[in-house]
Image (tube, rainbow, N blue to C red):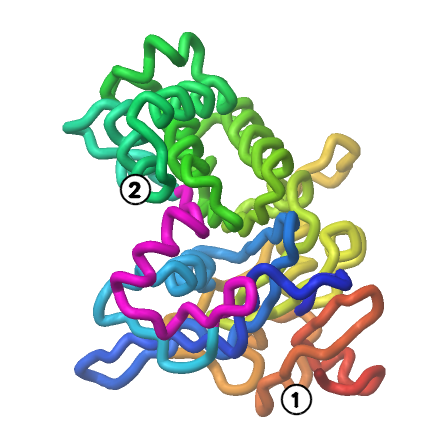
């Protein structure tokens, strides 16, 4: 769960629980999720739709949609607990210390204001600079994220930009206050393959230059393999596997992770069909007893149907929630 580093983690999430009260009972969408992100690290978070990836990001920055609520656990940012802060204190952290890149750039950009107005306002809200200096910084940011003729285009409205260019503007907006952590939630979903690669490269390069950490949320294991230092795999609101991305990609241990990896096409692949995981993610009101993945697992046995596994420590800092490894090592 913890990044391999002598320094304390930048972000530490401990036993995070997110619930949604309903008339028929309380649904648990995140169930004791724990992980760290080290300073300067890119942590990829992957899983199918409904796994809890976006909810994790929203909970960290205090943007859960009602009636969703944090019902347990803690979130720490550089040694300061932030999950229990007031709305106003959390608003000051969001943007200044944690930047957010959403899946749809139109949810981040106000169509009624120019890009210049939105960038300058964000910069001046969090950094004590003049409007002239803020505009200068905004142009430099647009230029850095690859907006052609940034000094001229800064006064355009969001609808004047293509989808890929809008996403670059959103990255500039997320980085405008020089945050320590950037949470990127499916930042490339609406783009073509070349656009996806460009956006990921821009995000990774700029964050590396500034020493910022990145939490990259995606359903695409291929993007994670090319981008992240470590990967966390979520399934039905629980952590299935977490560890160095090279180890997980080359030798996935959890059967669910292995299924995700088998679904990535490669240039050397000779099989006619990619690996498929049978079935679908369970609904929150129908999580099976034991391991939530057991109805879909090709290696299931009796204990999987009766008891839910906790994360088990493996070699090279990897942790896996699977009974296949319980006899080899002690539980975390």
Whichever of callouts 2 and 1 sits on the residue coming sooner in the sequence is: 2
**Residue 87 appears in view:** yes
Q: Which residue lies under the disc numbered 2? A: 125
Q: Is residue 267 left or right of residue 37?
A: right
Quarter of the image where one finds residue 305: bottom right
- Counting labels gives 2
Q: Position of residue 205 (x, y in %)?
A: 62, 32
Of all residues shown, which one is farthest toward the left?
112
Q: Quadrant of the N terminus?
A: bottom right
**Residue 163 appears in view:** no
Numbered badge on residue 302: 1
Q: Residue at x 74, y 40 (%)?
A: 271
Q: Secondary structure at mark 1?
A: helix
Q: Name the front one of labels 2 and 1.
A: 2
Q: Position of residue 179 (x, y in %)?
A: 48, 45
Marks 2,1: beta carbons within 8 A: no
**On screen, 72 above or below 198?**
below
Q: Position of residue 23 (x, y in %)?
A: 17, 82
Q: Residue at x 78, y 79 (%)?
A: 325
Chain part drawn in magenta: 75-101
Q: Is residue 77 magenta?
A: yes
Numbered badge on residue 88: none
Q: Is residue 22 left or right of residue 209?
A: left
Q: Quadrant of the C terminus?
A: bottom right
Q: Is residue 96 magenta?
A: yes
Q: Residue at x 44, y 16 (%)?
A: 147
Q: Nearer the viewer, residue 107 or 90?
A: 90
Q: Residue at x 43, y 77 (%)?
A: 17
Q: Position of residue 164 (x, y in %)?
A: 41, 24
**On screen, 63 above or below 224?**
below
Q: Nearer the viewer, residue 165 or 210?
A: 210
């Amino acid at each position: 769960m913890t990044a391999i580093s002598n320094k304390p983690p930048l972000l530490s999430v401990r036993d995070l629980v997110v619930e949604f009260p309903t008339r028929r009972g309380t649904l648990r969408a995140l169930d004791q999720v724990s992980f760290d992100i080290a300073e300067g690290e890119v942590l990829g978070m992957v899983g199918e739709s409904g796994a809890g990836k976006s909810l994790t990001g929203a909970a960290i920055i205090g943007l859960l949609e009602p009636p969703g609520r944090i019902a347990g656990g803690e979130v720490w940012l550089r040694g300061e607990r932030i999950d229990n802060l007031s709305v106003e204190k959390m608003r000051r952290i969001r943007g200044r210390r944690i930047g957010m890149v959403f899946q749809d750039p139109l949810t981040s950009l106000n169509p009624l204001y120019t890009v210049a107005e939105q960038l300058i306002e964000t910069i001046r809200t969090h950094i004590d600079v003049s409007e002239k200096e803020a505009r200068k910084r905004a142009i430099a940011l647009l230029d850095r994220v690859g907006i052609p003729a940034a000094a001229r285009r800064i006064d355009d409205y969001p609808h004047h930009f293509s989808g890929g260019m809008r996403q670059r503007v959103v990255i500039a907006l997320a980085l405008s206050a020089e945050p320590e952590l950037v949470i990127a939630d499916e930042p490339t979903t609406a783009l073509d393959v070349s656009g996806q690669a460009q956006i990921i490269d821009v995000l990774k390069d700029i964050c590396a230059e500034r020493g910022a950490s990145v939490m990259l949320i995606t359903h695409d294991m291929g993007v994670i393999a090319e981008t992240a230092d470590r990967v966390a795999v979520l399934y039905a609101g629980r952590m299935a596997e977490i560890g160095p991305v090279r180890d997980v990609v080359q030798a996935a241990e959890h059967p669910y992770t292995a299924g995700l990896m088998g679904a990535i096409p490669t240039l050397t692949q000779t099989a006619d069909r990619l690996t498929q995981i049978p079935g679908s993610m369970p609904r929150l009101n129908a999580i099976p007893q034991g391991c939530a993945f057991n109805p879909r697992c090709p290696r299931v046995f009796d204990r999987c149907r009766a008891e839910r596994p906790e994360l088990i420590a493996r070699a090279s800092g990897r942790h896996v929630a699977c009974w296949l490894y319980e006899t080899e090592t002690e539980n975390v």
